[in-house]
Image (cartoon, rainbow, N blue to C red):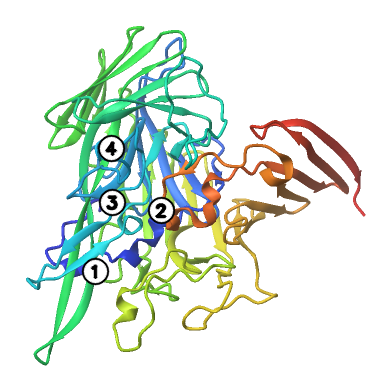
Amino acid sequence: MTFIASFAASAQNFPKVQDEYSKALTARSDVTRLDPDEMFGDSIGLYTGSLEFLQTDAILPGNNVLDVAIRRKLKMGERPLADNFYRGWQLAIPSIHGVFSEARGWSTSKGNDPSKRCSNFWWPAAEVVKATSGIASTKVFLPEEFWFGTFLYLPSSGDQPIFNSYNYDGTDFGWPRPTDGANYPLRTKDGYVISCIPSEDGTSEGFEVHTTDGVVYRINHMAIRPMVPLLKSEYWVTQGSQQLVQWVMRRQEYALLVTSARDRFGNTVTYDWDSSNPWQLNSIRASDGRRLDLSWSGGQVTEVRSGDKVWSYSENRIIYPDKSYWDFTSVDLSAASYDEGSVPGNHSHCYYPGDPTTKKMHAVMRHPSGAIATFDAAPTLHGRSQTPDSCGTKYDPNTNFWDNSSEAYPATYYLWSVTSKSISGPGLSAPLTWTYGYSPANGCYKSPNQMGTNTCTNSSPTTKWVDVTDPSGVVTRYTFGNQYSVNEGFLLNTVQPGREVTQEYSHANEEGFLGWAGILAMPSRSNPGGLMGLISPIKKKVIIQDGERFEWTVTAYDKMARPLSVTKSSTPQQ
């Protein structure tokens, strides 16, 4: 089982800036669970075929909404250098996290005090890096090249971007917040508000997250792990000979982890961390008496205990108190190798998505029930239409432009995409298999780029689709918009035999509701066209089924984009 990369001795194996497209291309993607029982905890983002897992090991039910549970998460294509929970799986608990430079740490370029990461929540500063070859030269790594945003993670909702509640001129956007007199400078698109608190060690700032259902999370325990460095390189000619010059920027993931949770009735849950090993959780304690204790060895969890119940973590298995078990002997979803051919778009540069690798990802895992799931993924070409020319380098045929150029908004790009999922096991005479087929990338540039290639025309597609074939052979086509700054990632149409659903979206300038979630501190390549912060509720839904046309239309919204009035109608389909 391959989860974690061995650190390559040569910087030549480090990814270049353009190899990191997959982390930046986070366009909106509807997540669909195809297993009715959700037994493997897999979530597939159909827009690009992304794959994530969230699995629960131990959970102690209580008489309130606060969890006492141990959950694990795994995201296809992640590149950790350090394993800090179990075989590449991360502990799934509330946190706020981002990837920053090793030299500056989690700091902000806003204000005079870079440690005020909450009250001055903003981008990190650019990083100036010296050449590794002894040549007196420096290279600038921009924030959007090494940092892809700072996110709030909750197991119930996944990663959410964080917005500033106030506009650039200091005016309030007008979103509701608690009336307790406290300052809430940050918020999420889901309506959670965030205040600033001291970090656990008192040297900087942490965050206090207030959810819409009344739960308050104190997130202020810092843990750090190394990430793969970034590489820039050029060939210089000195004294008639050619020399490779390299600049390596080292990065780390900084995570503030939850220390306590409180519901609106005063019930609490406390998370106890090891001060000497910041990633190691010692216990979770609830005010109603529930408790889980954890044991560790070599940075890996070995046991979770509740009274006389024990969950054991061995090399490839997680064994439950009833002796049922998970098995992860054959799981390779981590993109853990950095050698040539290991990333979906090797050698990518401006206007070219790179060379697709032949490597495929394959994972087989056994559920405690005895069911076995198999997942396959492959590098797949995706695209966006009406893309602006965003190459950061002016083309010069006399330089190594192709080696070092990168785009903020490439028209086409490779990502790991799920191609099949299969479940077999007791009670099944044959495996249940889902397959995923992706449309052409349909990417193009709004106007001619520097090379004059791939320019959009009046007939260029403005959508992309994925066909999902279920175990009974029924094919469902999901069609998404892929226009830059218009509808990239929006689900527009779903078609299966005998049924078609079409959706239209509304915008604030048409309806009068608040149009933006806030000011997003996010690099532009991670937020193409600003759509991540756009408030765009469904305006109209049309269903055609059994010879009838059913329409659902919103005729008025409140300022929070919630429907105030809706009309429904049905007519025979002509």
Q: Residue at x 46, y 28 (%)?
A: 193
Residue 120 location, quadrant: top left
Q: Of 29 and 518, which appears nearest the observer? A: 518
Q: Which element carries disc 1, helix, strand or loop? A: strand
The C terminus is located in which quarter?
A: bottom right
Mark 2, mark 4: which one is toward the viewer?
2
Q: Is there a contact, CB below 8 Å, between mark 1 and mark 4?
A: no
Q: CA distance from mark 2 to mark 4?
A: 19 Å
Residue under pointer 1 = 232
Mark 1, mark 4: which one is toward the viewer?
1
Residue under pointer 2 = 523
Q: Is there a contact, CB below 8 Å, between mark 1 and mark 3?
A: no
Q: Is residue 537 above or below residue 290?
A: below
Closer to the chain start, of discs 2 and 1, is 1
Circle 1 residues within 10 Å: few <14, some 14–19, many ≥20: many
Q: Which element carries disc 2, helix, strand or loop? A: loop
Q: Of 216 and 291, which appears nearest the observer? A: 216
Mark 2, mark 1: which one is toward the viewer?
2
**Can the viewer see residue 40?**
no
Q: Which element carries disc 4, helix, strand or loop? A: strand
Q: Identity of the amino acid at label 3?
A: Ala
**Direction bottom: furthest residue:** 240
Q: Is there a contact, CB below 8 Å, between mark 2 and mark 3?
A: no
Residue under pointer 4 = 255
